[in-house]
Image (cartoon, helix red, strand yellow):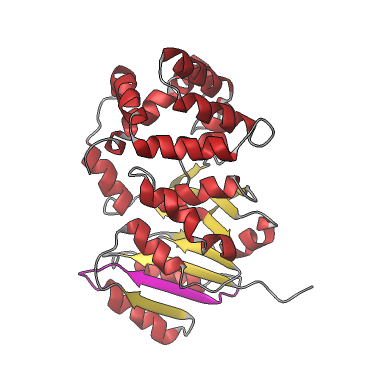
């Protein structure tokens, strides 16, 4: 056996003093030895930086950096990741709790894949949580990514700037979605079907604040307005670039379902949309978010998934 593979943990912080101690405690308690923990703060106004610096004094492998100006979630994670040196890179939110075997299990499982990710518990605490099992096949990634805090990535892959590009170029995409797409276009992704961390329901998190701003309340709105949103979305050059890229990188022999679906997403008109909806319904076990969309309502939801996707990403075509 060769030398033990090294792991870098990358955490980006912003006003996280409420939960960050518990998260850092869970990281330093990992059963797999960590090469480094890189913490990059994005302009916190609370005691987050002071807390992290206290941990850095106690644990020499923790390194704290503070941005001169606010970068935002995606740019902050990208620039922090470029500081890493490990064979593998694990992303960390500031308000989760990692279970002790998280890194060990993922290093053991990743093999030759670009990304290994796991299911996770979501809730106020582990006793009051639900298991989240996200999709990851490329056909699913046409519509949504999966959580960065579940990922362990190969270091060379994580530090390739081109793989972050979709998140920079496409308004509705975050960094983890971009990385997942390029992983499926490369050496692939493997999922561990067990929860390896607790993702706390934190109303102050960046994602929670984004969802709150959207103000969506009616469950029928995507069905009523989704077609209009989908047509508007197709007109955007970012949309054409994203799905054109996926279509050009796939073929009838490599990722054939994603190739066919991305081709349909590039075409205007009701007939391509109808065909796309049929494919989403037929393959809903690997496309739709709840892994199957059971029953007749599940079939309806999966058929309408492109419209639901368009409605939930209205900011894609709205002025930024």
Examine the image and state in which quarter residue 173 appears.
top left
Query: Can you say whether 278 is above or below 112 in the image?
Result: above
| Magenta region includes residue 34 | yes
Judged left or right of residue 55, residue 215 is left
Q: Position of residue 310 (x, y in %)?
A: 36, 29
Near-viewer residue (28 or 238): 238
Q: Position of residue 22 (x, y in %)?
A: 40, 67
Q: Residue at x 48, y 56 (%)?
A: 162
| Magenta region includes residue 289 | no
Judged left or right of residue 101, residue 36 is left
Near-viewer residue (240 or 154): 240
Magenta: main secondary structure: loop
Q: Residue at x 51, y 76 (%)?
A: 36
Judged left or right of residue 109, residue 170 is left
| The residue stretch that appears in magenta | 33-47
Q: Position of residue 147 (x, y in %)?
A: 46, 49
Quarter of the figure that contains the C terminus: top left
Quarter of the figure that contains the N terminus: bottom right
């Amino acid at each position: 056996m060769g030398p033990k593979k090294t792991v870098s943990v990358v955490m980006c912080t912003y006003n996280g003093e409420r939960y960050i101690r518990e998260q850092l405690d869970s990281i330093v308690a990992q059963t797999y030895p960590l090469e480094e923990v890189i913490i990059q703060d994005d302009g916190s106004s609370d005691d987050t930086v002071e807390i992290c610096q206290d941990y850095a004094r106690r644990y020499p492998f923790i390194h704290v950096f503070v941005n001169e100006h606010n970068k935002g979630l995606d740019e902050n994670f990208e620039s922090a990741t470029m500081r890493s040196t490990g064979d593998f890179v694990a992303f960390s939110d500031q308000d989760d709790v990692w279970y002790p075997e998280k890194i060990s299990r993922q290093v053991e499982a990743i093999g030759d894949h670009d990304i290994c990710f796991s299911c996770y518990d979501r809730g106020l605490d582990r006793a009051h949580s639900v298991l989240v099992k996200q999709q990851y096949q490329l056909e699913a990634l046409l519509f949504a990514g999966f959580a960065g805090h579940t990922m362990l990535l190969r270091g060379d892959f994580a530090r390739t700037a081109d793989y972050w590009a979709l998140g920079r170029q496409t308004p509705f995409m975050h960094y983890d979605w971009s990385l997942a797409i390029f992983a499926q276009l490369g050496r692939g992704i493997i999922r561990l079907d067990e929860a390896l961390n607790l993702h706390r329901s934190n109303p102050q998190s960046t994602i929670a604040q984004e969802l709150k701003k959207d103000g969506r309340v009616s469950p029928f709105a995507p069905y009523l307005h989704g077609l209009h949103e989908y047509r508007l979305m197709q007109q955007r050059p970012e949309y054409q670039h994203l799905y054109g890229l996926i279509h050009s990188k796939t073929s009838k022999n490599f990722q054939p379902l994603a190739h066919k679906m991305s081709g349909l997403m590039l075409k205007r008109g009701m007939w391509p949309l109808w065909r796309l909806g049929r494919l989403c319904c037929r393959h809903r076990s690997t496309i739709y978010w709840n892994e199957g969309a059971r029953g007749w309502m599940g079939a309806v939801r999966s058929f309408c998934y492109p419209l639901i996707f368009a409605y939930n990403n209205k900011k894609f075509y709205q002025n930024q």
